[in-house]
Image: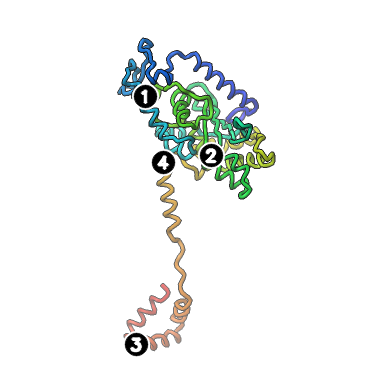
């Protein structure tokens, strides 16, 4: 019987086939707005349309003013992302609707495989981790592949000052690149990721004039579910630690690791009834911050009684002995205090 996320064997080939199909579909599209179009080479006879500024979201014919707006949106996006992004930023900058869908619809995200990736100089400079998530099944898919590249990998492998576990904890808070095979990433966010330099898949130079002309949001629900796991899941921590250990054993960071089918099924079943891992960020910033503030306040509140000073303890003990009590009353009385006042004082000792 297959697990909740299906068979892992062949998952890499499946992801590559999906990527190839997406690229082929992109290549034959005739209504893509290219960078040259945006710079003024646009031929109005092509009659391209956009949803920019339309209150009902229905496409209308594109105008030269739209091209100027597109250029401005792209410039603003480039300034917003200065090369790379962190898992926390992915969640913080995402759209509310995508965070909501991630919490309610995507309940599983398991790291399936990882490998060190070489740069143009043939040096391993990043760790490529393939996650598999469940799908909402709205469009017929049963699972999706999310690729995450950890840009701090080479430093984690080379660092001799910390254990592999500590290096993994640091690495998952640092810069990443990402990709997803779903339609929302392809049509809404791949251009944003390309301009922001945090795209792990093929680059997208076609402006999303219909789906996302305002260039809002950064990630789909599948990516957001993976980000929640990266931030807080012990499973991901162990997986990244193992990858760093393998990279250190090979000295140059090369090599790959995989999750067994048994372990993947176990993790998927464990996550199935909890949209986010315990203690991790849910993707809802207001909720996460309120929960963090509540946790901080509860830790600051003392729940144990204050220690009574040793001298006060001894006086309280003496006050409970009849003979000693009378002696204390006499001593207090010599201070000009009435017997009733002295009794009241002894009654309050130690409280």
Front label number (2 vs 3): 2
Between discs 3 and 4, the one toward the N terminus: 4
Pointer 2 and pointer 3: residues touching (CB < 8 Å)? no
Location of mark 2 (residue): 230
Between discs 4 and 2, the one toward the N terminus: 2
Location of mark 1 (residue): 70
Q: In which quadrant will I find the C terminus?
A: bottom left
- Disc 3 versus disc 1: distance between alpha carbons? 88 Å
- Disc 1 versus disc 2: distance between alpha carbons? 33 Å
Between discs 2 and 3, the one toward the N terminus: 2
The secondary element bearing badge 1 is classed as helix
Between discs 1 and 2, the one toward the N terminus: 1
At horizontal 41% and vertical 43% (from top left) the residue drawn is 287
Say which of 154 and 129 sits in front: 154
Pointer 4 and pointer 1: residues touching (CB < 8 Å)? no
Front label number (1 vs 2): 1
Left or right position of 128 against 294: right
* Residue 105 seen in render: no
Q: Position of residue 206 (x, y in %)?
A: 44, 21
Location of mark 4 (residue): 285
* Residue neighbourhood size for the residue with mark 1, other residues' Cα within 10 Å, grouped as few (<14), some (14–19), many (≥20): many
Front label number (3 vs 1): 1
- Disc 4 versus disc 2: distance between alpha carbons? 17 Å
The secondary element bearing badge 3 is classed as loop
- Disc 4 versus disc 1: distance between alpha carbons? 29 Å
């Amino acid at each position: 019987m297959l697990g909740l996320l299906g068979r892992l064997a062949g998952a890499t080939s499946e992801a590559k086939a999906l990527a190839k199909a997406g690229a082929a579909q992109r290549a034959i599209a005739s209504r893509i707005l290219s960078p040259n179009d945006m710079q003024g080479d646009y031929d109005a006879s092509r009659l391209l349309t956009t949803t920019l500024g339309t209150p009902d979201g229905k496409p209308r014919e594109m105008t030269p003013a739209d091209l100027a707006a597109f250029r401005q949106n792209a410039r603003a996006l480039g300034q917003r992302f200065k090369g790379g992004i962190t898992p926390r930023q992915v969640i913080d900058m995402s759209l509310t609707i995508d965070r909501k869908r991630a919490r309610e619809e995507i309940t599983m995200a398991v790291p399936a495989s990882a490998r060190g990736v070489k740069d143009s100089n043939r040096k391993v400079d990043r760790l490529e981790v393939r996650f598999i998530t469940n799908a909402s099944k709205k469009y017929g898919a049963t699972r999706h592949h999310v690729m995450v590249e950890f840009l701090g990998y080479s430093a984690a492998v080379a660092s001799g000052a910390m254990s592999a576990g500590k290096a993994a904890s640091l690495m998952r808070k640092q810069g990443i690149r990402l990709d997803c095979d779903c339609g929302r990433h392809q049509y809404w966010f791949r251009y944003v990721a390309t301009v922001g330099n945090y795209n792990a898949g093929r680059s997208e130079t076609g402006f999303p004039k219909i789906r996302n002309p305002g260039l809002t949001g950064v990630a789909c629900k599948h990516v957001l579910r993976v980000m929640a796991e990266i931030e807080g899941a012990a499973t991901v921590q162990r997986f990244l630690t193992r990858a760093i250990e393998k990279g250190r054993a090979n000295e140059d960071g090369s090599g790959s690791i995989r999750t067994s089918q048994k372990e993947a099924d176990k993790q998927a079943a464990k996550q199935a009834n909890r949209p986010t891992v315990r203690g991790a960020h849910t993707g809802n910033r207001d909720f996460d911050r309120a929960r963090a503030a509540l946790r901080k306040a509860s830790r600051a509140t003392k729940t144990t009684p204050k220690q009574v000073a040793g001298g006060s303890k001894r006086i309280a003990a003496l006050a409970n002995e009849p003979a000693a009590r009378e002696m204390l009353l006499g001593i207090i009385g010599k201070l000009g205090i009435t017997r009733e006042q002295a009794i009241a004082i002894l009654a309050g000792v130690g409280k």
